[in-house]
Amino acid sequence: MSKEASNSLKVLIVDDEDALRYSLKRALSNRSFTIFEADSGEVAIEVAQKEMPNIVLLDNRMKGMNGIEALQHLRGICPAAKIIIMTAFTTTQTTIEAMKFGAFDYIMKPFDLSKILGLVDAAASVITETSKEGQSKKQDDTVIEEDLKVGIIGNAAAMQGVYKMIGQVAPTDVTVLITGESGTGKELIARAIHKNSLRSSQPFVAVNCSAIPENLIESELFGHEKGSFTGASQQRIGYFEQCDRGTIFLDEIGDMPLTAQTKILRALQEGEIQRVGGTEVIKVDVRILAATNKSMEEMVKENTFREDLYYRLNVVRILMPALRQRKQDIPLLINFILQNLAKKNRSVANTISKEALDMLVGHDWPGNVRELENIVHRSAVLAQGNTILPKDLPEELNLADASKSEREARAADDTKEAEINFERLFKSLCQLTDNKDILKAVEAELIKQAMAASNGVATKAGKILGMTASTLKKRIAEHESNQ
């Protein structure tokens, strides 16, 4: 960030740690910012009212008003300011709310100064460019006060990115496509978006497209008129009408038949539907969230999914990481599952031994969080005490881990055997060549075998050996002259 670009910008550092404020102020000193400090949210509000800062570095855990509360006040005072939340303690709730309430970004303590400086420079660049284009606008500071309680657990970096995306897209009406493997919790993400949206007081309807027979899916989604088909004894209101002004979540949308896809596209583009067997055009105001564990791009190529609908759905994509990609979250997830289970049934185990935990962390989890939840539930019920032990885990899990250990052991043995064979090969070569020109002897034999394998075609043999045909021919000539 150039000094010229940052010269007129004001930065407010809000943290109750004097040492951190000093470090940040010193690190920012060569940016030519005008820097202000506050040791609490209350003081930050007073400073902001007087100085109207452009960038705010805001701690979340402080005495008195916390960072999220201060953020909401600051958004009203200086709505164009870029506010970066700093905290050593994070939860799903705080990350989502920070982004939902307009934070520019969110960074975990302890952090490298280079990272926070990078965020500040990025914020300054956005402000400068916006100012140049004359597009600085007051942001909507409408907030939703309802708490998010949807059970999304995880502190891994990949999950923090998901929370940020939720916070950013929730207040809008943008269509979101949630992708990821089966069992990663895509419906939880959809519910979190709805709960934090301006539609949160309206209906949320989740539809599993793969669970509805193809001949009934249009009726389920859009409704039908009486007598429109055999068995339609009365009029039925479909899911789209049921959640008018709310949110519909189309899970496993990749399994939706092409005929229904056409009507979904019309609902997205025009906000209109028609019941099966009806002629009336019905206006609906529905936000669509969709999810799939399939490759939509491949389906479009195979003509099993409409390309125009794919682009309409894929406005914003949220990718849910597989559980094996965030194994550090497994202990948190297990604790959360056990706590919820204990609330419903006091007779089940509510803790897990280190040995059992290590086994679960070491598992690959092809079924992701859903598989973890099922195994923890089963083990907690079957455990003879308050603690889940290795013997309480499913036998197939023990067998899978044992099989994995055996494979690793065999691989280690194969590697060792390869080393032994190489040693024998080297000794044999020494004996055959009298310890002279081993490399030449090996190269000559490799060239001979490659030429035989490629039927004497130098180009093919060269590819096998990793050299050009011309180089290979030179090598052959050299070996023939030395014979």
Image (cartoon, rainbow, N blue to C red):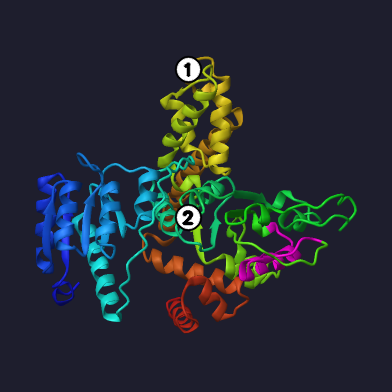
Judged from this view, the residue extending furthest toward the right is 230
Q: Residue at x 55, y 25 (%)?
A: 379
Can residue 152 be spotted in the picture?
yes
Q: Is residue 469 above or below residue 94?
A: below
Q: Which residue is mark 1?
A: 386
Q: Determine the main secondary structure of the stretch shown in magenta.
A: helix
Query: Could you tell me which quadrant the N terminus lies in?
Result: bottom left
Judging depth in this view, the residue of 29 and 386 nearest the camera is: 29
In the image, residue 300 lies at what x, y percent?
Answer: 65, 69
Q: Is residue 55 left or right of residue 162?
A: left
> Does label 2 or label 1 sit earlier along the sequence?
2
Numbered mark located on residue 399 in the image:
none
In the image, residue 10 lies at what x, y percent?
Answer: 16, 65
In the image, residue 192 lies at what x, y percent?
Answer: 49, 48
In the image, residue 6 lies at what x, y percent?
Answer: 17, 72
Give the secondary structure at mark 2.
Answer: loop
Q: Is residue 63 left or right of residue 188?
A: left
Kindly report which numbered mark, 2 or 1, lies closer to the viewer in this rendering: 2
Magenta residues (range): 255-276
Can residue 304 be spotted in the picture?
no
Q: Is residue 120 above or below residue 339?
A: below
